[in-house]
Image (spheres, coloured by chain):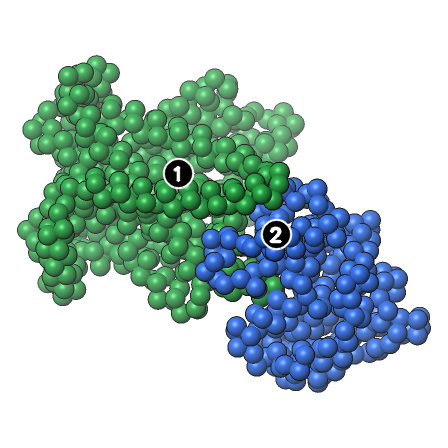
Chain colours: A green, B blue
Amino acid sequence: MTLRDYIAKKKKKNRIWFFGILLFGGVTAYGVNFDLFRIIFGLPDMFNLLGRMFSPEFSYISEAMPRLLETIEMALVSSTLGVLMGVLVALFTAKNTTLHWIIPKIIGPLLTFFRTIPNLIWAAILVTIFSVGKFPGMIALTITAVLITVKLLREYIETLNKNLLQGVESVGGSKLQVLRFAVLPTIFEHSLSVYFIVLEINIRSATILGLVGAGGIGQILWRDLNHLRYDNLATLIILLFLTILIIDFISLTIRKNLKKFYIPRTSIASFKLHQQKKWGGVMALLILGFLWLFFSLDITPERLIVGLGSGRDIILRMVQIDLSYIPRLFEGLLESAYIALFATLTGGAGAVVLSYFTAYNTAPSPIAAMILKGVVNLLRTFPPIIVAIIFFRGVGPGPLSGAMALGIYTLGVMTKLYSEVIESEGTTIQQGIMVTGSTKLNSYRYGIFPQTFPNFISLFLYRLESNIRTSTILGIIGAGGIGTLLSTNITWRNWERVGLLILGIALLMITIEKFSERVRKRLI
Amino acid sequence: MISVQDLYVTYDKRTPALRGVSLDFYDGEFVGIIGLSGSGKSTLLKTLNGLVLPSKGKVLVEDKDVSRLKSRELRDLRRGIGFVFQEFNLVDRSSVLENVLIGRLGYQSSFKSFFGVFQDEDYRLAEEALETVGLKEKTFERGDQLSGGQKQRVAIAKTLAQEPRVILADEPVASLDQNSGKAVMDTFQRIQQKYGISVIVNLHDVDLARKYCRRLVGLKHGKVLFDQKTEEISDDDITGLYS
């Protein structure tokens, strides 16, 4: 290949990339009914809503407070129970620590299937079983907490060195003892940090579960939305924002300081005492947790039994999927996919630009980087389904609101993650290029960006997976996608159709996961 | 006494690691197994306590066939045999004391030990073991605070807490610098002389092997090349082993 060929090829390749992305973006924009004029004309109304958020009505805050506390309670209890159960499930289903090799083979695929069902859908179904209230919400959150914990922890356990396990096996320890003395101490810190990650996820989910009647502040949010009380909505949104911010801050502080927790003992006696105290403490905590759960639940035993009965009926009907509904299923899935793709593409493209100004080593000034970091954190604080409500004010319900809300969230998350990649891996490459007298911008364009491109694609694919999951629920509030079909069919109790829709979502999710796994493997 | 009879081990049904090894190990010995990496040293050692199972042949420990034991019996066998790994295999996030107490697990019921309940006797043995390896002052430090040589001595203390008849050591000094390696080998020598525990150690450093072991077994391509008292080994034997 001559130099001239190389240059021609390179130019062609760049052009194909550029127009390919543009075309793809165009198709997805069409898919979500993108309309620039509608957005522009809607801007004043949206700004008006945003403006109101800065003058919250204090009288309404006192009305919303009990609901807010209920939301926090739901998140705390379900995270605690869910992570405790999740740790056990993870230990027994990881390939290297399981008691029998058959267990992961059976439970693994089952968990993968359950993980594809968004927790708002869990909640919506559970509400029809156990009636409106926080009980169905708690169960839905606990299920998600278990599933997330298992995913995060099982991968971690499977990377543990075989040596660690053999160290206990070689003294004649049983499998249970291997778990207790080698695995548990090793994963303890990681499990704590998983707990706080789950808590951060669950506090966000808890705020929106009320949209389907599963308790918490979302219930009055939904009511105000239906009554078009945008003044109250503004107050609720700012309240939620502050709550999430505070919990994130506490969680981050604890996660950062976990390593410093080790207290050395000074004598065998004090070590023994500490051991007893530790187990006493854990037991007390568990009992207290269950008592708290028991007294905070708004459900009678009779209602529970009735619910379990109707739950069984619902599952039996769901299994007999309604195949005549397949055309509508594809319609819904396609719209959801458009929303997710549009959001990931626009958010991702925006993140490439915004990350340059947000990473400390590339930003024009550290102050700008700091301000932008704050903005980025703001963008990713909100559950997209709430941001969609803000867009309703401007462009009305429909896929465009959902897509833009998801796009903004994606922009926030991807900028945060990618700017961290630039900060950790970019400095040496940047120096290598800057010494030639190049500008910062060119060192990014010709050095850092090509170098970290695989990381970027990997982040992009993870976001795509997560966005497809989110796009399936946006329809519950009317923001487009398959969620609209789901929520109407749940309301009308067409369980055969709900069964088909859930199966369709699961298949789509699993396909995307497999696809992105394959691409990621090829990149590395 | 451990008796290895015509032992074959094949990994993945293709790569042979041991090809017909027969050896006897007697109580109270200090034996070194030497050879190139890939000669089957590590595999041989791991068959002696059932971490690796033979594809043909037998390993008899006190006249019991290791590959025929049920899991409870295998665990009983293992608690009488200490095993020291090249990479120490400690739980880094647990304290030194907890790591040594792991040596007592074979004597505990699963249920009781799950709550971390150990008897006074267990603590006494753990303390004594740490004293023997000279690390008593590190008892309450976390595993990851120690140097490599210290970690290996904690691993030895762990096997001592098992009250073993034999200690098997798989390349115990290969990950250590010279001085720490010497300290570890001195520790083995001390416990072999003090308690009469037999020590079987894999080494690739011939000088170390000659200095500490009283009997040397040379392995080459999965077969025994020589098996003699250390002073009877000639330089030609060694050259033959590494050529």
Tell me which chain the residue with mark 1 is part of: A
- Which residue is at a point 62% across and 41% down the rendered structure image? A267
Q: Is residue A92 left or right of residue A54?
A: right
Outermost residue, front direction? B120
The amino acid beneath tag 1 is Phe
Front-lying residue, A359 or A4 = A359
Q: Position of residue B240 (x, y in %)?
A: 87, 74
Label 2 neighbourhood size at 10 Å, few (<14), some (14-19), many (20+)? many
Q: Position of residue A359 (x, y in %)?
A: 49, 28
Q: Position of residue A396 (x, y in %)?
A: 14, 31
* SS at circle 1: helix
Residue A302 visible somewhere in the drawing: yes
State which quadrant residue A249 falls in: top left
- Which residue is at a point 79% across and 79% down the rendered structure image? B224
Q: Is residue B199 left or right of residue B146?
A: right
Position of residue A248 relative to residue A493, above or below, is above
State which quadrant residue B102 falls in: bottom right
Residue for badge 1: A196
The amino acid beneath tag 2 is Tyr
Position of residue A391 relative to residue A321, above or below, is above
Tell me which chain the residue with mark 2 is part of: B
Q: Are marks 1 and 2 on the same chain?
A: no
Residue for badge 2: B123
Q: Position of residue A259 (x, y in %)?
A: 53, 37
Residue A214 visible somewhere in the drawing: no
